[in-house]
Image (tube, helix red, strand yellow):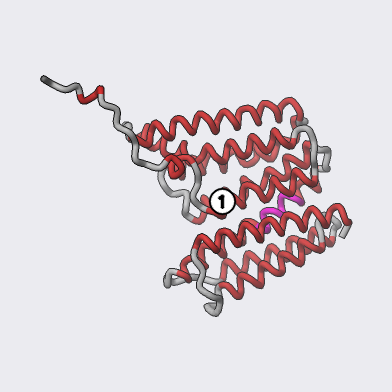
Amino acid sequence: MAVNAQAIPVRSKIPAKSVALPIEHGAWGFLFEPLLAGVILAPSLAAPFISLFVVGAFLSRQPLKFLLGDWLQKRRLPRTEIARRFSLIFCSIAAVGFLGSLVFAPGHSLLPFVAVAPIVGFLIYQDVGRHSRELIPELGAALALASSIAVVALADGFTATLSAALWAAMVARLVPSVLYVRERIKLEKGKPFDQFWSHFAHIAALVLVGTLYYFSLGSSLTVLMSAFLAGRAVYGLSGSAPKMTAKVLGVREVIYGVLYALTMVVGYYAGI
């Protein structure tokens, strides 16, 4: 008797987590550092919805990468259904956050998201082409995610100047981190690495946050933290630092990022 093979379901052996969630520890820091600082600095009715939108959009990236890639290749794999399911869940979360933001946030507060929309489109294109771990997409992701602090600030009535300064201060944290981590991983793997751009970015970041502080748009604590991060980059790429796995490196960067965000918060409320 013939057996109908199509009637036998094939269960996927692919872990759902690998399709649904980003595996890079540093990516979570890029997501939450601007939101942490923004929500504490500017706690408005809109802030939770803006955060929900950003988190939902961020989480949508991973499953959409598989879903769109499989769709363009005209293939249906076990992971495709997993990606479809999680894409629907995360996009729904983003939609709820976006609608809430439209209700509770002034229209102009969403302009930073409009400004980074082309970057987000580029990132989606790179994701589908499996190029998301290259330098330019990582820098673009840092710039786009950092914009959330400006949106939250504008929604709470902060001036455009101060909101832009908060965005700039967060970019000064995230971009040098991208460059440092990439080169540090190369060093740990025994591959050729370059210190110049990491060091240059940290020095530029220190100058930037120092300038913001000079014009009363930043905190002296943030300047000190930026100086510490510059020192850790110099030491970390000197070849004298202890060996470190990529996972530990990522976790440390998340901790440094949280501390950086807190310097912005404490400095603002303390006026230092």
Residue 182: where, in percent of width, then height?
51, 62
Question: As drawn, is 246 to the left or to the right of 46?
Answer: left
168 is higher (above) or lower (below) than 111: below
Question: As drawn, is 57 to the left or to the right of 164?
Answer: left
Task: State which region is magenta.
Answer: 166-173
Instruction: Report if residue 167 lies within the magenta region.
Output: yes
Image quarter where the C terminus lies is: bottom right
Q: Front-most of 197 and 242?
A: 242
Q: Front-most of 247 and 269?
A: 247
The answer to which quarter of the image holds residue 219 is bottom right
- Counting other residues with Cα less than 10 Å from the Cα at mark 1, is it few (<14), some (14-19), or many (20 or more)? some
Residue 212: where, in percent of width, then height?
79, 58
Residue occupying the far front of the picture: 1
Residue at 55%, 79% (x, y): give it: 240
The answer to which quarter of the image holds residue 93 is top right
Q: Which residue is mark 1?
A: 27
Residue type highlighted by circle 1: Ala
Q: Secondary structure at mark 1?
A: helix
218 is higher (above) or lower (below) than 207: above
Residue at 42%, 72% (x, y): give it: 190
Residue 216: where, in percent of width, then height?
86, 57
Residue 154: where, in percent of width, then height?
78, 39
Question: As drawn, is 116 to the left or to the right of 74?
Answer: right
Residue occupying the far right of the picture: 271
Residue occupying the far left of the picture: 1
Residue at 57%, 41% (x, y): give it: 58
Residue at 78%, 36% (x, y): give it: 155
